[in-house]
Image (cartoon, grey):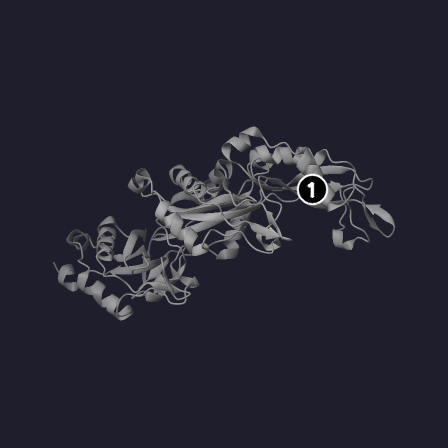
Amino acid sequence: MIFSAFCLATVRAQEADRNSVSNVDQSAEFPGGRKAMLKFFAENVVYPEEALKQDIQGCVRISATIDKDGSVKNVEVVESVHPLLDAEAVRVVKQMPKWNPEMMDGKPMSVCQTIPVTFKIPNPVNFGVNEHTVNDLDSKPEFPGGIEASKKYIAENLIYPEEAKRQGICGRVLVVTGIDRDGTVKVLGIEKSVHPLLDEEAKRVISSMPKWKPGIKDGKPMRLKTTIPVNFGVAEHTVNDLDSKPEFPGGIEASKKYIAENLIYPEEAKRQGIRGRVLVVTGIDRDGTVKVLGIEKSVHPLLDEEAKRVISSMPKWKPGIKDGKPMRLKTTIPVNFGVAEHSIDELDRKPEFPGGLDVCIKYLAVNVKYPKEAAKRKIQGRVIVDFVVNRDGSITDANVVKSVHYLLDEEALRVVKTMPKWNPGILDGKPVRVKYSLPINFKIPESLSAR
């Protein structure tokens, strides 16, 4: 079985391109363009049978280098869904034909691309239900006693798997359910999976439901498909339901300050260069108690554990209020390890080299020292360096995101790290940490090329 929905995104710092001294003549492109790319994926991606069986779906992000000759190299997963899907995404990207390479100043260049491959389980053609939607009907299907009664039934009959509790697995499973003409309930599949342990229990409890009152059209009962949410460790209310939202003592800025002051960056993670943003699923109880429910976005076990520790240590919050009563609520709290808090597009004023772009170009021209070995071997090109401009304008976390050769990469990093403090990015009148991308062009000077 072959199924694929595909989209392509180029890992390119747009701000960096605007600041570039040289322009890209032509971006790297799959032969024939995007439509040809879509067709290639549709014809070559094979959905793993075991993944279909387990209802595993999602978007795998692949990083690959498009070399100067257009060949696809250095294929690796940068955002995983499941080993089954990851392996298939890597396999098919490695099979790609040669691309049209990126051209700069009339010469082919190596470039890094991010290719998202989306695996979505298609709806079977026949679920044993008709083509009617809820909005087509004269009266909708209904659990005996209505929506609140259905929530109560699920809450009273759901058995939270102990192993899932132990691992801190939580979330909302969406169960695709058929309501037959006689009101019989039939589980048709999973629209949104959390984990096999939770998925199976969600299917079990929905299958155990009593008969519903069926939907009616023109006086006749109709088969209909609907989706039923089953919550595991998730609050019944969302932030938008509430009259007042839960709040850390002192507000958002105070919560950021608390995390920054109490976070202990694991030394081993620093040594390995591991960084990123962990999203911690957090429950705020009626008395404001903070409870870690799980990890929505993982970076690495070392960072995940520290993120959970610092969130668990938080003082009580002001709880969310609905109809004058405190409510349990789930929220997601980001914990940053060596990453910027904001993207450049969010800012009121972008970070800037002191004196502006022209002064920055002059600084690079004066301070970049062309490696003699690179000149001797005729190595040149554009290195793109990412770094964080901190609230005080200092530069940290510099790393190469587009490499040419290690000799040029090292020099680009050296000169970025020796830069003076920048004017920081501004949001809502306050300086913020933000990631910035800077291209550094290496063209062999005549004084060296003549040697």
Instruction: Give residue 140's position: percent from left, percent from top.
Output: 78, 50
| In the image, residue 359 above or below residue 190 | below
For residue 345, what is the image quadrant?
bottom left
Q: Which residue corresponds to mark 1?
A: 151
Task: Point out the image quarter for the C terminus.
Answer: bottom left
Q: Amino acid at mark 1?
A: Lys
Outermost right residue: 219
Relative depth, front residue between 360 and 370 = 360
Instruction: Please report the residue visible at 40 percent of the width from the left and 44 percent of the height from the top.
Output: 75
Q: In the structure shown, which secondary structural element does the residue marked by tag 1 occupy?
A: helix
Relative depth, front residue between 217 and 352 = 352
In the image, is 314 to the left or to the right of 1? left
For residue 298, what is the image quadrant?
top left
Instruction: Please report the residue visible at 33 percent of the width from the left and 59 percent of the height from the top.
Output: 391
In the image, is 245 to the left or to the right of 16? right
Instruction: Give residue 251's position: percent from left, percent from top.
Output: 46, 55
Residue 403 visible from this viewpoint: no
Residue 419 visible from this viewpoint: yes
Is disc 1 surrounded by few (<14), some (14 to 19) or many (20+) residues within 10 Å? some
Outermost left residue: 451
Relative depth, front residue between 135 and 163 = 163
Instruction: Give residue 361's position: percent from left, percent from top.
Output: 25, 66
Instruction: Please report the residue visible at 31 percent of the width from the left and 60 percent of the height from the top.
Output: 438
Please count the marks in the image: 1
| In the image, residue 444 above or below residue 41 | below
Task: Point out the image quarter for the N terminus.
Answer: top right
Instruction: Give residue 68's position: percent from left, percent from top.
Output: 33, 53
Instruction: Please report the residue visible at 61 percent of the width from the left and 36 percent of the height from the top.
Output: 199
